[in-house]
Image (cartoon, rainbow, N blue to C red):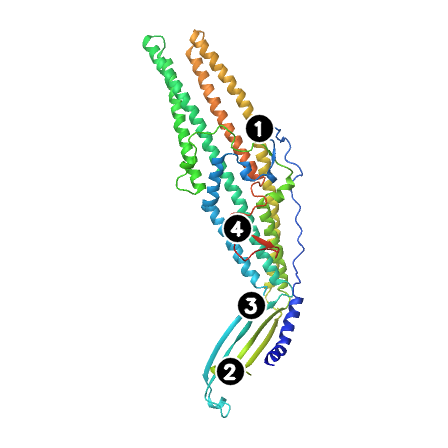
Amino acid sequence: MRNRLIGLDAKPALGALAAALLLAGCSLAPTYQRPEAPIPAQWTDGVRAPQDGAAGTSAASAAATLDWQAFVTDETLRALIELALANNRSLRQTLLDVEAARALYRVQRADRLPGIEAEGGGMRQRVPQDLRVPGTNAVQSSYQAGLGLAAFELDLFGRVRNLSEAALQEYLATEQAARSAQISLVAEVVQAYLTRDGAQQRYRLATRTLQARETSLELIAQRRRLGAATELDYQEALGLTQQVRVELERIDREIRQASNALALLVGVTDVRPQMPAHPRTDPLLVQDLAPGVPSELLALRPDIRAAEHRLQSRNASIGAARAAFFPRISLTGLFGSSSAELSDLFESGQRTWSFAPRITLPIFDGGRNRASLDLAEVRKDMAVAAYEQTIQTAFREVSDALAATDTLRREEAAQRALVQSTAESLRLSEARYRSGADDYLRYLDAQRNDFASRMALVQVETQRQIALATLFRSLGGGWQGEAPTRLHPRAGTDAAAPRDARP
């Protein structure tokens, strides 16, 4: 019987709450429409697509379907990238920003559900005689315990819902920023590794050249002692030898600095145990990338998706600002027991409940709500401009990377032809010098040109590989369909919201 009475007493309050919840959900946010992408339909004129077999053995691969593990073909470089993704401090800060944004979203989302609290309290007070009911004690007590409904706003006009949506979009934008940071980190490790590898190749070339020139210098010194060579011949040969020694020290500095850069990116105290002792001869990366069409950047580039999520957040904020002009209804309630004696608190007949709806309607606020709405609309316009600028920047980066890979491929081919020419000139010049047809200065010029062209070829090869890594990053390759490291998965849209349960 007691349970039936409790149900009958609570029915009006629960019914009112259920009806109000059914009415909630109206949103005053503008309908979101993605702005038009302010970029051409095709890449910049003059950029030719890579041909199968050109400057590499692999056919062109689409960045949309190529992850970084497939793009990087060298096992040592892959291992370094894995270390960087696990240990890089800058990336760790970015991932923690994602966790912070996720927590803020969960805090904001909690306002959409009523908060139920267990409450308990007591009070003892002395009532003055002129206020006391005749026959009652001067000291009176009151005790109460039960379940309370904290002030819960009925979201009739979508204010709380839009604030939750804005927080969700900010979280998703931060998550995409983390993806972008990871792709950039992969590209930076690849570029630092390629820089070190190219410097090692030039160091090895310079070492072989120094050995040959030291041998030549010794022969010139012997010829000078015999009177067959002049002092000028000796000083020219000595100058060439010292030139290579200077170049070796410069390259050694580059190798050390590239190693330091790798150590910072990888996040370990000493990266040398992970580095090969000698430069690699096989390609470290996939040699051809198909850029697709510019519109694919909207889906591939995490920074563009992050900018769009921020735009959607500003769009939802307009709905919350509009809802501030309308009435706000909040509910407060309590169901439990109350008694003047603590020992009787849970006895039969001590049941109590209260239900206190409250409505507020702004009448005069000094223009605060109007200014808040204007600010929300301006911030949305700023987000649109930022979104369009991000797209234009992405288009420019890809166009620059395509131009670099296209021209560097041809420059490398031309440089190889130059190396063959200078090598042949050196061979002929040496033969003419030894036969006495030419003087030693012309032979030294041929040595100088051959060394410079070979060093330039190594640098161009390195630059082209770095340009490939830049193109891969610019196209947004690397994490298609893969969640960023250490990020928690999402479920649906509020349903696109992250799951509360940690993996």
**Which residue: 42% across, 24% down?**
206
Q: Look at the numbered discs 4 and 1 and tell me whether their residues touch, using CB distance below 8 Å.
A: no
Identify residue for label 1. Answer: 57
Q: Which amino acid, mark 1?
A: Thr
Image quadrant where one finds the N terminus: bottom right
Q: What's the CA distance linking mark 2 and mark 3?
A: 25 Å
Looking at marks 2 and 4 on the same chain, the residue that comes earlier in the sequence is marked by 2
Q: Residues within 10 Å of mark 2 (few under 14, many from 20)?
A: many
In this view of the protein, which residue sits in the foreground, 206 or 83?
Answer: 83
In this view of the protein, which residue sits in the foreground, 450 or 176?
Answer: 176
Identify residue for label 3. Answer: 115
Q: Which amino acid, mark 4?
A: Leu
Residue 254 higher or lower than 22, as above or below: above
Q: Residues within 10 Å of mark 4 (few under 14, many from 20)?
A: some
Q: What's the CA distance linking mark 2 and mark 1?
A: 87 Å
Residue 339's tag is 2
Q: Position of residue 314 (x, y in %)?
A: 60, 55
Q: Is residue 313 left or right of residue 432?
A: right
